[in-house]
Amino acid sequence: LALRHDHYDKIGGTTNPKLGLRWTPTKEVLVRASAGTGFRAPSLNDMYRPTKTGATSILPDPVYCAENDFDLGICAFPWETRTYANPDLKPERSRQFSVGLVLQASDRLSFSVDYWNITKRDLISTLGDDVILDNLAKYEPLVHRYSEDEGLDGCDYDDTDNSICFIELRKENRGRQKASGLDMVVDLKPVATPLGRFGGRLNSTLALTSRQQTGYGDPYVSNLSRFVTNGVVQRWRHRLTLDWDSGPFALSVSNSFLSGYEDQNSAIDPDTGTYIAPNRVKAYSTWDMSGSWTPNKQFTLRGGIKNLLDTAPPFSNQGYFYISGYDPSYTDPRGRSFYLSATYSFK
């Protein structure tokens, strides 16, 4: 049983308990469970950062499109955004629980599976600009437009009447988020053979749910295996590592895998003024290899290759990030790379 208390100026205090249970009915079986609450205070950046100016991806404005025969070449544009901090933010709070089972199949081999469930409330976030433009009946006050009669401070002089001057994005406490999944581990401790010792480990996560409200009372929107606003949660991911060592030499090969998903499919080609063709992002799988030589207790030479097969990121038509053609939030476009290091201890 654990109990933690935090206190922040201007935000207040919070007390969060955690309960953990372990039961070992036999030497080969372990049952475990935990439950608790969590707390995340807004950062100084969330509360006091100066106004930040940016831009959306190329998005259609329903009002301006209706006035221009829905010609995306005219009414779709990277609209200016202004993001404001909020000194009145409340902290995020969460409730979570997990239950799991560990099986020791032998002295060398074990399996574990844990179910986890997390609910957050009072999320600290800004509305997505695409959410605002898709729900103007609710969020029109956040869209500031230019009027030739009244003008609008900060707009360009050549702005067209009724076009968007800027979209207001403000840090707020908005709605809830729910997520659940399974963490699974297979662990093989080194086994001696005539060719050396072999071992391995598989760490994996199967996401079962991932959904979030844009505001209190709004329906939940799932981003599981689907790019929504600014990101995606892959249904399956794993890290597989195979190890070998013999005397002073050691070698390790690892695979990182992320499953595919439905792309954003709302990006607009600025050259043609049409939506880019629908796409499903393929799975992303990369292999790494590393090795070491330790001739004595003082010296170790290490080297390795990241992205051994020089795998390129899968194509994505997402329009949220200005680096187009792939999703930079979880892929690496640099391709194969090498590293080498040496360590000497004087002890």
Image (cartoon, grey):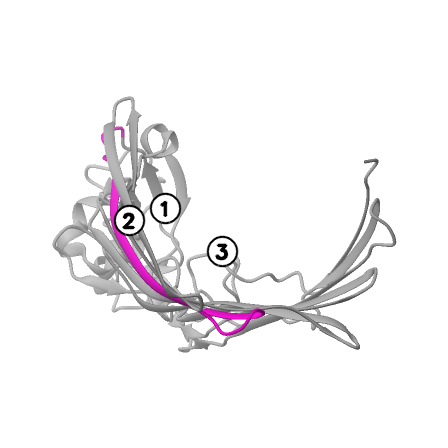
Q: Nearer the viewer, residue 150 or 114?
A: 114
Q: Is residue 36 above or below residue 77?
A: above
Q: Determine crowd level at label 3: few under 14, some 14-19, many 20+ residues with C-alpha closer than 10 A.
A: few
The reply to whether callout 3 and callout 1 are in contact (CB within 8 Å) is no
Q: Earlier in the sequence, mark 3 or mark 1?
A: 1
Q: Which residue in the protein does label 2 denote?
A: 164
Question: Nearer the observer, disc 2 or disc 3?
Answer: 3
Q: Quarter-wise, where is residue 267 in the image?
A: bottom left
Q: Name the amino acid type tagged 2.
A: Ile
Left or right of 298: which side holds 5?
A: left
Q: Name the amino acid type tagged 1.
A: Glu
The reply to whether callout 2 and callout 1 are in contact (CB within 8 Å) is yes
Q: Earlier in the sequence, mark 2 or mark 3?
A: 2
Q: Earlier in the sequence, mark 2 or mark 1?
A: 1
Q: Which residue in the protein does label 3 denote?
A: 322
Figure quadrant of the N terminus: top left
Residue lying farthest right?
Answer: 295
Provide residue 77's location: percent of width, then percent of height: 37, 57
Left or right of 88: which side holds 345?
A: right
Q: Determine crowd level at label 1: few under 14, some 14-19, many 20+ residues with C-alpha closer than 10 A.
A: some
Q: Quarter-wise, where is residue 304 in the image?
A: bottom right
Per the rendering, the mark at residue 80 is 1
Q: Determine crowd level at label 2: few under 14, some 14-19, many 20+ residues with C-alpha closer than 10 A.
A: many
> Bounds of the magenta span?
87-111
Provide residue 28's location: percent of width, then percent of height: 44, 69
